[in-house]
Amino acid sequence: MQPRPPETLNQRNAAFDNRLRPSRFAEFVGQQKVRDRLLLAVEAARQRKEPLDHVLLSGPPGLGKTTLAYILGEAMGVNVKATSGPVIDKPGDLAGLLTSLEPGDILFVDEIHRIQRTVEEYLYSAMEDFVIDIMIDQGPNARSVRLELPRFTLVGATTRSGLISAPLRSRFGLSNRLDYYDHSDLQTIVTRSAGKLDVAVDPAGSLEIARRSRGTPRIANNLLRRVRDYAQVRANNQITQPVADQALSLLEIDPFGLDEMDKRILDTIVRKFNGGPVGLSNLSVSVGEETDTIEEVYEPYLIQEGYLERTPKGRVATPLAFARLGLAPLASNRPGELPLR
C-alpha cells in the first residue's frame, strides 16, 4: 500500500474554505440584492424546466463568487465543473470541457477576463447556439468540425470586469456585482464559521474580528483561523474581545483593519511624498511591492475607507490617513512639515 502523499498548503487552505463555505442560499449571508435576483432566476428556470441563463459575477476577491456558483448548482440540482481563465489555453481545452457537460450543468470559469482572445471567440457560439466549430488539421487539409453541445450554464467570475470584452459581456443574461460586506454581516459569518470549527466566540469577539476583516468574508475566515490558534494555546479555546484584539495585534492588524503593508503605503505617501500626489511606479519602488498588487489588492480598500484618493497626478493621502498616523494634515507641500498631534 502506497503511503498517502502529504497535503500541500494550498490543498489544506482549499479544504478549510470548503468546510466553511455555505452550500445553500439560505446559508449565504449578505449581498441581499444579488441573492434575490439569483433566487428569482433559479425559480423561473426551474418552473420552465430550462437551464439557468448565463451568469457573470464580478467584484473584489474573497466576496463569494465561487461560493455562489456552487450554490447555483445546488439550487438547480445540477453538477458544477470548475476551471479558470488562464487554464483554458487553446480551443481544444474548451471543447473538452464543454463536451463533458451533462444537460443543464454549470461550467464555472474563475478569472474569466484572463481567457485567451482566440479561445473566447469559440465561447460566443457555445453560449448562444450551443455549438462549437473546431478546426482540424492545417493548410489544404484543414476542415471545420461542428460539435453539438448540451444546453449548459456558463457562470463567469472576475475581479476586473472592465477587462471583459463587450461581445462576451453581452452574452451573459445575468450580470451581478458583489460589494464589500458590512460589519454585522461579517459578524454573522464569523459566528457561523466558529460553530463549524468548534470554537466558542462571544458577540464582542466575533465583532472584533469582523471589524478588522476589510469587508471580506475570506479575510474574516482567515483571521478567525489565526485567532482560533491563539485562543487554543493561550485562552482555553474561548474567543472574547480581548483575546481577538491580542491575537490580531500579534498579526499587526490594527482596529481599523489596516495591516502592515496598508500602513507602509500610507506612511510612505505622507512622510516621503508629503501627502502626494505620487505616481504608482514611485510608490511601488518605495514600499517594495509590485504595482499590480498595490492597485488590485491594497488600494481598493484604502480608497473605499477614505484613506487614499486617485487623481490624474497620482495618489494622494486624505486627512483621515494623516489622522490614522497621528499627524496633522499639511497646509503646504513643503517637505519636513509633519507636525505631530
Image (cartoon, rainbow, N blue to C red):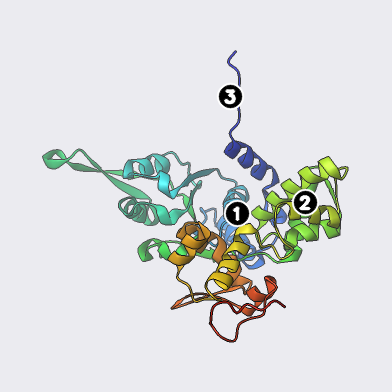
Question: Mark 3 or 2 closer to N-term?
Answer: 3
| CA distance separating discs 3 and 2 | 32 Å
Where is residue 100? Give x, y as percent: 43, 38
- Residue hosting label 2: 247
Residue type highlighted by circle 1? Leu
Which residue appears farthest toward the left when viewing the image? 140
Relative side of 143 to 132, left or right: left
Residue type highlighted by circle 3? Pro
Which numbered disc covers residue 68? 1
Q: 68 or 44: nearer the eye?
A: 68
Asked whether the viewer can see residue 173, the reply is: no
Which residue appears farthest toward the front when viewing the image? 336
Residue type highlighted by circle 2? Ala
Secondary structure category for the residue under label 2: helix
Question: Mark 3 or 1 closer to N-term?
Answer: 3
Secondary structure category for the residue under label 3: loop
Residue 86 vs 169, above or below: the answer is above
Relative side of 87 to 28, left or right: left
Secondary structure category for the residue under label 1: helix
Residue 45 vs 91, above or below: the answer is below
Total tally of numbered discs in the picture = 3
- Residue hosting label 3: 5
Q: Residue at x 59, y 52 (%)?
A: 72
Relative side of 249 to 334, left or right: right
Asked whether the viewer can see residue 330, the reply is: yes
Q: 11 or 48: nearer the eye?
A: 11
Q: Residue at x 52, y 76 (%)?
A: 276
